[in-house]
């Protein structure tokens, strides 16, 4: 499998023959190396225009919900390099295949289903990744099939560590990586509880460290 980094909050970098970011935030280690940047929704801890400008190069593709498109265009990013997504769709854009499902809260108003925000399911070099973004353990999330999943465990604005573990035990990936803690909600303890609650056949990696900046790991 590929080199994976979890940087801050829900900021993920996957390295293969392309460099792919999800919700990049405060990325210090890399500059202008992104082939694709995926944004799940426009909240400040998932969408950072500064991070996008630090990471993009001339032909970087930005995959996003409609909310931030106007701002991207206003800073000179060309429309041909923006892929606007909505839930329940399959995409094959610039030779990268991925699906979207809705990301939303079940009993809170922070992330409503009708906002149209998304989780991504990416097929990349023989591995299927589920990047949940901000969501609860929804019916759609429970139907995901993947090899590697990134799920929020911090609670407050998303599912908590117990709900996240129950979700992952249902979808049964090979590897589970908890994120979305230690920045606006939750702590490493939530990630540790999540890991303990997983079925023994699911490998768990804690890549987001206490200092809010993660370490790269070959998984």
Image (cartoon, grey):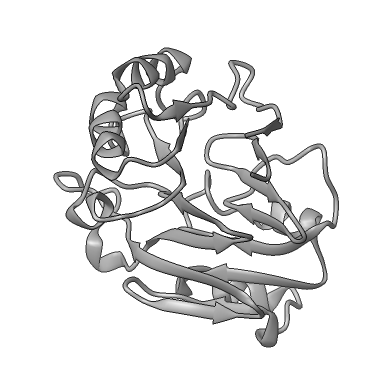
Q: Residue furthest bottom?
A: 80
| Quarter that holds the N terminus | top right
Q: Is residue 4 left or right of residue 59?
A: left
Q: Quadrant of residue 97?
A: bottom right
What is the x, y in percent for residue 121? 45, 60
Q: Is residue 141 above or below residue 159?
A: below
What is the x, y in percent for residue 63? 57, 70
Q: Is residue 119 above or below residue 206?
A: below
Q: Residue furthest left?
A: 107
Q: Is residue 116 left or right of residue 49?
A: left
User: Which residue appears at 66% of the width and 58% of the height?
Assistant: 49
| Quarter that holds the C terminus | top right
How many labels, in total?
Answer: 0
Q: Quadrant of residue 74?
A: bottom right
User: Which residue appears at 75% of the width and 61% of the height?
Assistant: 18
User: Which residue appears at 51% of the width and 28% of the height?
Assistant: 183
Q: Is residue 217 above or below residue 188?
A: below
Q: Is residue 100 above or below residue 181?
A: below
What is the x, y in percent for residue 137? 23, 43
Q: Camera-side residue: 170 or 88?
A: 170
Q: Is residue 3 left or right of residue 197?
A: right
User: Which residue appears at 25% of the width and 25% of the height?
Assistant: 162
């Amino acid at each position: 499998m590929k080199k994976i980094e979890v940087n801050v909050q829900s900021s993920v970098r996957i390295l293969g023959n392309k460099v792919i970011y999800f919700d990049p935030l405060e990325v210090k280690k890399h500059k202008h190396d992104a082939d694709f940047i995926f944004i799940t929704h426009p909240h400040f801890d998932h969408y950072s225009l500064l991070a996008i400008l630090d990471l993009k190069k001339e032909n970087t593709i930005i995959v996003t919900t409609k909310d931030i498109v106007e701002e991207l265009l206003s800073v000179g990013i060309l429309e041909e390099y923006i892929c606007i997504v909505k839930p329940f769709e399959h995409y094959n854009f610039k030779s990268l295949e991925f699906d979207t499902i809705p990301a939303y809260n079940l009993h809170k108003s922070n992330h409503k289903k009708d906002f149209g925000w998304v989780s991504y399911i990416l097929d990349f070099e023989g591995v299927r990744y589920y990047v949940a973004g901000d969501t609860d353990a929804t019916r759609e999330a429970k139907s995901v099939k993947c090899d590697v999943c990134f799920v929020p465990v911090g609670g407050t604005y998303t599912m908590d560590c117990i709900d996240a573990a129950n979700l992952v035990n249902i979808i049964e990936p090979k590897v589970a990586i908890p994120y979305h803690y230690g920045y606006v909600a939750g702590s490493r303890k939530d990630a540790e509880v999540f890991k303990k609650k997983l079925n023994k056949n699911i490998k768990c990696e804690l890549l987001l460290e206490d200092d809010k900046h993660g370490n790269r790991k070959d998984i």
